Image (cartoon, rainbow, N blue to C red):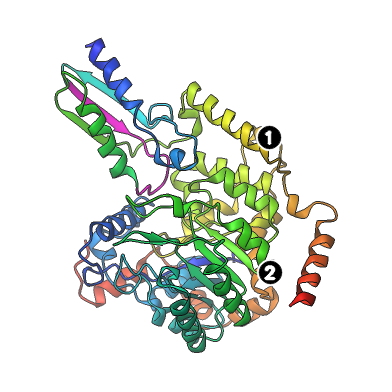
Amino acid sequence: MIDGMFVFNAVAHAYNMSDDNIPNSHYANRLRDGLVHLHMRQGDFAMDGAGQCTDWPIEVLARSLFLESDCDMAATHTLRLDSWFHDGLCRREKTVEAVNRWPQRFVGYVGVDPTRGLEACLDDLDEQIDEMPSAVGLKLYPSQVNPHRSWRMDDESLAFPLFERARKRGIRTVAVHKAAPFGPVPIAPFRVDDIDLAADAFPDMAFEIIHAGLAFTEETAMLLALFPNVYANFEVTSALINTNPAQFELVMGTFLRQGGSEKIIYSDGSMVLHSQPILESFRNYRLKDETLERFNIPQITDQDIANILGLNYAKILGVDIDEAKAAIADDEFARERARTGIQEPFSNWRKHLADARLEVA
Amino acid sequence: MAGLREAVEAALHTVYDPCSVASQSPVSVIDMGMVSALDVTGDTVEIRLLPTNLGCTLVPSIMIAMEEALGAVPGIGAVSIAIDKDTHWSPDQMSTRGRDLLSHRRAQAQAQMPIQPKQWMLQGQDEARRRRLEMKRRAS
């Protein structure tokens, strides 16, 4: 918690960025380089390339989140970037391990690749939910490479039956990666013009636009304004508060005017980005006077910040905040944190790499 | 080399920000304010490219497009393009022409589909949504 506000980080991953996980493809290499670059821009505490290009254990993710930051809970996703990384970048075993070892701290998303076709997707979805019955969300990517292929969220013959099955199996929210193309690939699948019909057809499910605001901000704001069940998920977008404050201000002004603080979900994508520097900046974030005038909106309040940091996402998932607080009050992370205080950013990752005798500068 | 500088700027005006193209409002890298420095000395050209976005994965493609456009300029020598990591891009860096173009396109779009802020929570919306969900439940 930060100043008594419950922090529910809606996207956290333990990537596998090791050489063994990269196919011989310039798309894969460029994406990994892009992620390394993204990580290194956040500050002096960042890991170097060699440290990042390893298989990140789920335990290190958990320790980074709950010992090095004020995050109280987090969602972790099974990723299906199958044509970029052999294991999709974050394999399902890690998601299952997280929710089984620390159910009081993690919620899990299953992940399928719709470019494989409906039958394969439904079988995959059922298998993953059988394995992780507590799954709350479905994570999707809009395209794959080698060869280039994509699908749309408003496809009634592919996406809708998939959402139908997910809903039947208890999935509450669909998170789709948008607004951040993976290198020199077709941009169209990363636009947000296919969310509207899906949100309208499945009004009792939530739809999270992941990386909302990195591009197509105006179009995303329209969706937030129009559809009660569409949300802006701030994975990576949240880092702009420190790395590009002007763009962050623009995105916040646009989304607050059109959607309101109830439609923004905090996340950061830890561990590619560290939560704590972002949380500390966001806790005291206030809009500039010229932004208030430009967008004709009131100043952001502590209630708005609390909504964004955790209340909105907890509401989507049906998580009772008081029960969640009680469940983590005396768990292994709370006890260690009470003993050591907040730990240094990525200190647990560095210790893991040192223990594994990997060379880290 | 005023003539060469003008030719270089004209060439860069033919290179478009990929996201603006995807938004169906193409704006050149010059008008987007993505060229934060341009130095022409003799026939040598040095450019600083300012990405609009943290971790933009299209930077290499933009650089390639710039090099290809400049390669067609007569009399040009060595071209070097470096990423400007010291400056934060914001809409304030756009040219007047770029801002006018985008505001015109937005006004057009909003005229076609007027959207009210927080339309999802306007008076009566909650009740309308509840009725609609109930109707769908009955139907299924």
Magenta range = B44-57
Across and down, in percent, residue A353 comes to: 27, 72
Q: Nearer the viewer, residue B93 or A52?
A: B93
A128 above or below B109? below
Q: Amino acid at mark 2?
A: Lys
Distance between mark 1 and mark 2 Cα atoms: 34 Å
Q: Nearer the viewer, mark 1 or mark 2?
A: 1
Across and down, in percent, residue A168 comes to: 62, 81
A16 above or below B14? below
**Quarter placement of the N terminus of chain B:** top left
Q: Which mark is residue A279?
A: none
Residue at image position (53%, 44%) is: A248
Across and down, in percent, residue A244 comes to: 46, 43
Q: Which residue is mark 2?
A: A315
In which chain is the residue bearing label 2? Answer: A
Across and down, in percent, residue A301 comes to: 70, 50
Q: Amino acid at mark 1?
A: Ala
For the residues labelled 1 and 2, say whether their Cβ atoms are less than 8 Å apart. Answer: no
B107 above or below A159? above
Occupied quadrant, residue A197: bottom right
Dot 1 lies on which element? helix
Q: Which mark is residue B111?
A: 1
Q: Is residue A115 visible?
A: yes
Residue B45 among magenta residues:
yes
